[in-house]
Image (cartoon, helix red, strand yellow):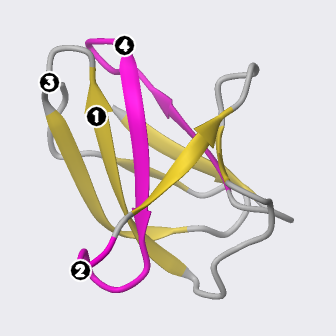
Amino acid sequence: MVVSSISTLFSMQVTNANYAVTGFEISTDGGQTWQGAVRRDYNYFEKSGGGGFGTETVAVRVSCVNGAKVTLWNVNVNGGAWMQAAGNC
């Protein structure tokens, strides 16, 4: 599973997941709270209302149709960045 981003607004895509992605959440406080993202028709997840989070890194939690969740910590939100997850769902 790979998470990648683009600049100008918070927009991330999950690729190479073993199962269909059903949810995408973002945390800016080390996982204490989570905010859901909106899935767009072009298969990117974006912050509801647009814009960014005012931070260079976030935690991302991906949920899949099989019930599994994968959490990635310290994900860079700068444009063109990507991160390989330690696991897959």
Q: Marks 2 and 4: CB-CB under 8 Å?
A: no
Circle 1 residue: 63
The earlier-in-sequence mark between 2 and 1 is 2
How far apart, in angstroms, are the residues tagged by discs 3 and 4? 10 Å
Kindly report the distance in space between the C-alpha atoms of the residues bearing marks 1 and 3: 7 Å
Q: Nearer the viewer, residue 7 or 39?
A: 39
Mark linked to residue 67: 3
Magenta span:
11-33
Q: Position of residue 52 (x, y in %)?
A: 72, 73
Task: Identify the residue under disc 4.
Answer: 20
Disc 2 is placed on an element classified as loop
The type of residue carrying mark 2 is Gln
Q: Nearer the viewer, residue 71 or 82?
A: 71
Which circle marks residue 84 in the picture?
A: none
Per the image, label 3 sits on a secondary structure element best described as loop
Separation of disc 2 and disc 4 at Cα?
26 Å
Callout 1 touching callout 3 (CB < 8 Å): yes
Residue at coordinates 44% horizontally, 73% vertically from top-left?
58
Judging from the image, what secondary structure is the residue with disc 1 in? strand
- Location of mark 2 (residue): 32
